[in-house]
Amino acid sequence: MRKIIIGVMGPGNNPTSTDLENAYQLGKLIARAGWVLLTGGWNTGVMDAANQGAKAANGLTIGILPNNNTNHTSEAVDIAIVTDMGSARNNINVLSSDVIIACGMGAGTASEIALAIKANKKVILLNSDESSKVFFRNLSQINVFVVNTVIDAIEQTRQILLTER
């Protein structure tokens, strides 16, 4: 049986302390649910925090790397997929995930959310930026969900998975 893959996307550079704590907790709860965590794979920001959280709960992690250099891969990534595609790897992140949770906001995260909307994927926004919430909800009222806590993000993920099966 195919495993469920949950993508956690968020800023690698300049995440807030809240973004990092949320990402760590998301990683832990994703692992505890028995799901596989997918991130951009680097050892910075939301990517690393989510991977560290998943590993703390003995989860399986996948990192989709933007280049052909594995030197910056999070040590908490179990499976590193080398793409050498730069930001084009964002489409792989989105299409490989059953549900995407955007934790925080940055340019790369915004591109992943937009790609997810185009691909008719479900996206959960967990961030404090009101303008991005309004913007993305206006793009897709049926595929974009706004939550305020990690627990709400995991519960929304469960609901999405139940209705998608």
Image (spheres, rainbow, N blue to C red):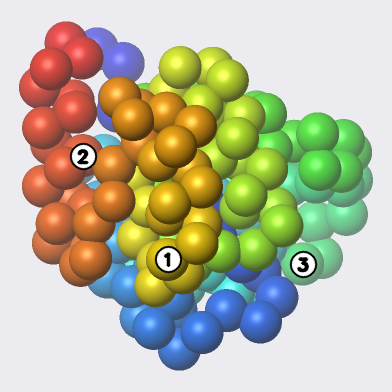
State whether residue 2 is above or below residue 15: above
Q: Amino acid at mark 1?
A: Glu
Residue shown at the point (35%, 60%) measured from the top left: 126
Residue nearest the observer in this picture, 110 or 137: 137
Crowd class of label 2 (few under 14; some 14 to 19; many from 20; radius 10 Å): many
Instruction: State the residue lying farthest toward the bottom.
Output: 17
Residue at (68% x, 43% y) in the render: 111
Q: For marks 1 and 3, give the CA distance.
A: 32 Å
- Are there few (<14), some (14-19), or many (20+) residues within 10 Å of tag 1? few
Task: First in sequence, mark 1 or 2: give its number.
Answer: 1
Distance CA(mark 2)–CA(mark 3):
29 Å
Determine the secondary structure under disc 1.
helix
Residue 31 location (% of width, % of height): 25, 52
Judge left or right: residue 127 versus residue 95: left
Between 64 and 19, which is closer to the camera in this rendering?
A: 19
Q: Earlier in the sequence, mark 2 or mark 3?
A: 3
Which amino acid, mark 3? Answer: His
Q: Residue at x 70, y 53 (%)?
A: 108
Residue drawn at point x = 56 percent, y = 64 percent: 105
Relative to 157, 66 lies left or right: right
Residue 157, which numbered label? 2
> Which dot, 2 or 3, sits closer to the camera?
2
Between label 1 and label 3, give the one nearer the viewer: 1
